Image (tube, helix red, strand yellow):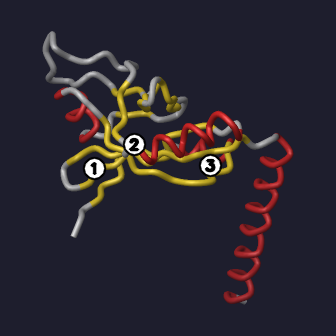
Amino acid sequence: MSTIKVVAENRKARHDYFVEDRYEAGIILTGTEIKSIRAGRVNLKDSYAEIVDGEVWLNQMHISPYEQGNRFNHEPLRKRKLLLHRSEISKLVGKVQQQGMTLIPLKIYIKNGLAKIELGLCKGKKSYDKREDIAKRDAKRQMERDLRERSKG
C-alpha cells in the first residue's frame, strides 16, 4: 500500500490548458530541496517541462531555500531532471513536436518517501474556452445553491 501526500498543486494549469494525458515522474533533487518540499515550500505556478536530448527537464519550479540550510543550500529556480521511462519519453517527443502540446506539472507529491511529479500533456485553451469553463462552473454553483434553498424551504 502506497502513501501519497500531495505537497502542491498547479490549479492555474487546469484553467489555462486542456489536460490530454498524465504521467508520473521522479525528480532528481539535492538534500535541501527535498527537505523544503516536505515542508511544503514549493510553487508550480509558472513551471513547465521540456525535452532536451532525450531527457526531460523541469524549468521554473520554485523550491524555497531550506531554513536550516547552510552554504550548500540550493538555487530556488534551477533546472531539475525528471525521471521517466525511455518509451514514455519517446511517446512524449512525438506529441510535443508534432501536435504542439506542452508538458505542464500538475502536482508534486511524496509517495513512499520519494518526491514525484504528475506531468500533464496539455493543449492550450483559447480565451473563449476559458469563458465557457467559467460559465459552466457558475451555472453548476447556481444549481447547487437552488437545490439547497429548495431542500431548506
* Circle on res. 86: 2
Q: Secondary structure at mark 3?
A: helix
Q: Quadrant of the C terminus?
A: bottom right
Q: On the rendered image, what quadrant is the N terminus found in?
A: bottom left
Q: Specify the amino acid type for callout 3.
A: Arg
| Type of amino acid under label 2 | Arg
Disc 1 packing (10 Å; few <14; some 14–19; many ≥20): some
Mark 3–mark 1 distance (CA, rounded to whole Å): 21 Å
Can residue 144 be seen from the camera position used here?
yes
Residue marked by disc 3 = 14
Residue 41 higher or lower than 109, as above or below: above
Give x and y (percent) for residue 23.
46, 51
Q: Residue at x 33, y 46 (%)?
A: 116
> Against 22, is 56 above or below?
above
Residue for badge 1? 110
Badge 2 marks a residue whose secondary structure is helix
Amino acid at the residue labelled 1: Ile
- The local secondary structure at tag 1 comes to strand
Q: Which mark is residue 10?
A: none
Q: Position of residue 67 (x, y in %)?
A: 20, 24
Compare residues 33 and 101 and report the one nearer the observer.
Answer: 101
Q: Residue furthest top?
A: 71
Q: CA distance from mark 1 to mark 2?
A: 23 Å
* Place of residue 140 in the rendered image (x, y in percent of width and height, measured from the top left): 74, 69
Q: For the point 73% across and 61% down, which residue is it?
A: 137
Query: Residue at the spot x=82%, y=40% of the render?
Result: 127
- From this view, report whether residue 27 is shown above or below residue 119: above
Q: Is residue 4 left or right of residue 48?
A: left
